[in-house]
Amino acid sequence: MKRLLTAFFVWIAVYVAVTATLVGFQRAGLDMPLPVQTFLLTAVLVPTMIFILGPLAATLAQTVIRKLG
C-alpha cells in the first residue's frame, strides 16, 4: 500500500509539473521543435523531481499512511 500511495503522489507531482512547464512555454511564446521542447522540459523537471517534488511526495505519502493507520 505504501509504495502504491507513494507512486500516486509522485505521479500527481509529475503531472502538475509537466503541465505547468508546458503552459509556461506557451505563455512565453516559445515555438520550439518537439525535441528541443522535450530537452528543456526534462532539463527542468528531472532535477525538480529528484530534489524537490519527489521527497515532498514521499513525505506526503508517509503522512497519509500514518494517519490512515
Image (cartoon, rainbow, N blue to C red):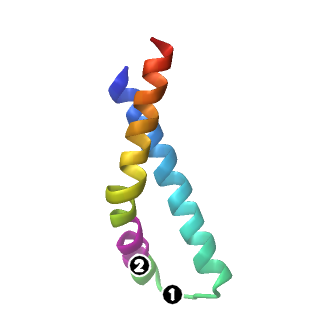
Q: Is residue 68 above or below residue 52?
A: above
**For residue 56: magenta?**
no
Q: Quadrant of the N terminus?
A: top left
The crowd level at tag 1 (other Cα within 10 Å; few <14, some 14-19, many 20+) is few
Q: Do residues under tags 1 and 2 come within 8 Å of each other at their CB atoms?
A: yes
Pick whichever, 69 or 2, lies toward us.
69
Q: Is residue 15 above or below residue 30?
A: above
Residue 25 locus on image (x, y percent): 58, 79
> Where 8 falls versus 11 (above or below)?
above
The residue drawn where x is 43% and y is 42% is 57
Q: Element type at marker 1?
A: loop
Gap between marks 1 and 2, in whole Å?
10 Å
Task: Label 2: state its secondary structure.
Answer: helix
Q: Position of residue 56 (x, y in %)?
A: 42, 46
Query: Horizontal placement of 23 versus 18: left or right?
Result: right
Q: Is residue 29 left or right of residue 64?
A: right
Residue bounds of the magenta highlight: 38-45
Q: Name the residue located 36 percent from the left edge and 47 percent from the top edge.
A: 55
Which quadrant holds the C terminus?
Answer: top left
| Identity, as a three-letter code, of the amino acid under mark 2 | Leu
Question: Which residue is pictured at 33% across the width and 58% down the height?
Answer: 51
The residue where tag 2 is placed is 40
What type of secondary structure mainly makes up the magenta span? helix
> Residue lying farthest top?
69
The type of residue carrying mark 1 is Met
Mark 1 — residue? 32
Residue placed at 39% from the left, 63% from the top?
48
- Determine the image quadrant of residue 52: bottom left
Q: Earlier in the sequence, mark 1 or mark 2?
A: 1
Magenta span includes 42:
yes
